Amino acid sequence: MILARDNNDVAMMKDFEVTTDDFSSAGIASSKIKKILRQIGLESSVIRRIAIATYEAEINVAIHSVGGKIEVYIKSDKVEIFVEDNGPGIADVNLAMQKGYSTATKEIRELGFGAGMGLPNMEKCSDEFHIESEVDQYTAIKMIFTL
Amino acid sequence: MDKYWHSVVLDNDYCNGCTNCLSRCPTQAIRVIDGKAKIMKERCIDCGECLKICHFHAKGTLSDNLEKIQNYKYKVALPNISMYGQFSAEYDIEDVFQAIYKLGFDLVYDVAYAADILTKYQNELLREPAIEKPVISTYCPAITRLIQIRYPSLIENITRLESPMEIAARQVKKKIMQEQNLEFDEIGVFLIAQCPAKITSIMQPLGLEKSYIDGGIALESIYARLIKAIDKDSRNHDLVQKSSGNGVGWGMVGGQSFGLDTEKYLAVDGIEEVIRVLDKMELGKLPEIDFFEGYACVTGCSGGVLNVENPFMAKARIRMKSSTLGSYDPNEIDSNLTREDLEWDVEMEPRTILKLDKDFKVSLEKMAKLEEIAQKLPGIDCGACGAPTCRALAEDIVMNRAKYSDCLLLGKYNRRRQKKTQGENNED
């Protein structure tokens, strides 16, 4: 089952659709998230980490999946981010977590994406990182940022 | 002085309450209230975008009159670097500098030469292994203030070296105090300014307690007098121009990077493009870049709103002039300043004015409310309410600066939308 939500103490929830192969709008969700967090007044280093992690997630969904969504739960002591797509899933999650490993096509690499740093970057930026995936089904990521 | 003093000001008599400037402002600092545009002082970065767009010339700049120099025993003019592009090719820049003397100055010091001094230290800085890259230039103060508000996490990337005009002022004051045996306060140093952001930087500097410059005179305000004073046949004062082609190049976008020992630089002009690049930089997506220079104005300082010439023409002239001068040689720099003299005195703090509340809990509540309101507004950002976007109106409502009823479309728009969906349902 896809990673469970904990709806306790949620001050605000926002969700964003991410469509596949849409590079022109990739980055819009993360920049909206950044703006909201800035208005709430989180510390700038935390905002930056969240912005990088959600940007990487957004690009990943756009490049590798058939489409998905990002959900942001803002709580009094943490921000939780769920990223879920509708497939095709990752066969070997451990391999995908390695720096520089990528299944991106040559065309995508030429655009400057697909360097194999997306997942490692998300893990590095977040305080807690969970990923699960089922081939032909989905990939789901949960990231926690403590405030 | 007011904590948020600005050179950019608004003239109520000319403002007709249109919405042109609203959407143009990069920090959403303008609201139209009771038919007149108002600038939220704490948000303004003096970029001058509103000045450029206003058809009614309702926006102006506060700058000093030439008469103010008479308050000082010894009067120094600092012509800003973009002045190299402001006069037609028939005038040598030296003749322009000689004409500045005739307006009543005792000394003209070329800011382009101070840029040469700075280039030497910027190269030194970029060689330091511990330096946070990309290093961001502070030459355009509007961009520095933009970072302070919108990109606080990039503040550590900003160079701690002062801008050329400030270096020029320090160099000159130190020299004249010694040579002429004068007190610090007896020497008046005035920038011949290209834009309001520079003037604000003199009155409200970032990175130092007090500017060494005593005032800013808009170039446009003395341009006609300068043209009349130019006389190609008499050079009665010491020759001023001794900057390299690189120093002169600072008058246009890319000029300052050109003098660096690296090709790994990025030079961007126009505030919208700068914002796009800074977004990328904040995400860590510019790993190959060591140095960044960004300008609010298209073409760089040549596009300054207090300049007179067409920005592209001015830029072309600077390029031509720069190519005829010698290239920059760090060993020939004549400066009485040490690197410490060039560095900031005080740290720059983030300007967290976008925050909804000091208290995190209250802020969260307001944010949730803002989201709720934003959902109900039409979302077409027409500006008729006086706020630049529907989201900005939602924010204003939450902050008690505006009311729901300020949205002129609220009822109508929703009724139309409902009718439309009803119509579609009927067709089914």
Image: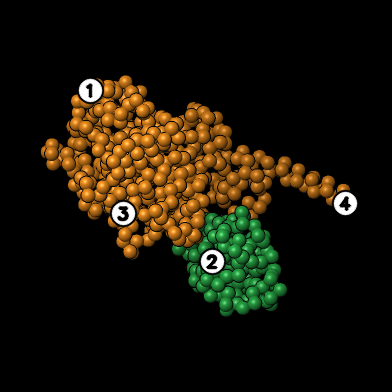
Chain colours: A green, B orange
Write down the residue under mark 1.
B234
Q: Secondary structure at mark 2?
A: loop
Q: CA distance from mark 3 to mark 4?
A: 70 Å
Q: Are marks 1 and 2 on the same chain?
A: no
Residue closer to the observer: B136 or B263:
B263
- Which residue was labeled with disc 2? A115
Q: Disc 2 or disc 4, which is closer to the eye? A: 2
> What kind of residue is marked 1?
Ser
Q: Are marks 2 and 4 in contact (CB under 8 Å)?
A: no
- Graded by Cα atoms within 10 Å as few (under 14), some (14 to 19) or many (20 or more), the crowding at tag 1 reads few
Q: Which label lies toward us, 3 or 4?
A: 3
Mark toward the start of the polypeptide (4 vs 1): 1
- 10 Å neighbourhood of mark 4: few (<14), some, or many (≥20)? few
Q: CA distance from mark 3 to mark 2?
A: 31 Å
Taking the image as shown, residue B281 lies to the left or right of residue B333, namely: right
Residue B240 lies in what quarter of the image? top left
Q: Chain of mark 1?
A: B
Total numbered labels placed on residues in the image? 4
Q: Residues within 10 Å of mark 2 (few under 14, many from 20)?
A: some
Residue B177 is left or right of residue B404, and the answer is: left
User: Mark 2 is on which residue type?
Assistant: Ala
Q: Are marks 1 and 3 on the same chain?
A: yes
Q: Nearer the viewer, residue B328 or B53?
A: B328
In the image, residue A106 sits, relative to residue A136, either above or below, namely above
Mark linked to residue B123 = 3
Q: Which mark is residue B27?
A: none
Label 4 – label 1 distance at C-alpha: 87 Å
Question: Is residue B334 visible in the rendered structure shown here?
Answer: yes
Which residue position is annotated with label 4? B428
Which residue: 29% across, 56% down?
Answer: B124
Residue density around tag 3, few if under 14, some if 14–19, many if 20 or more, within 10 Å = some
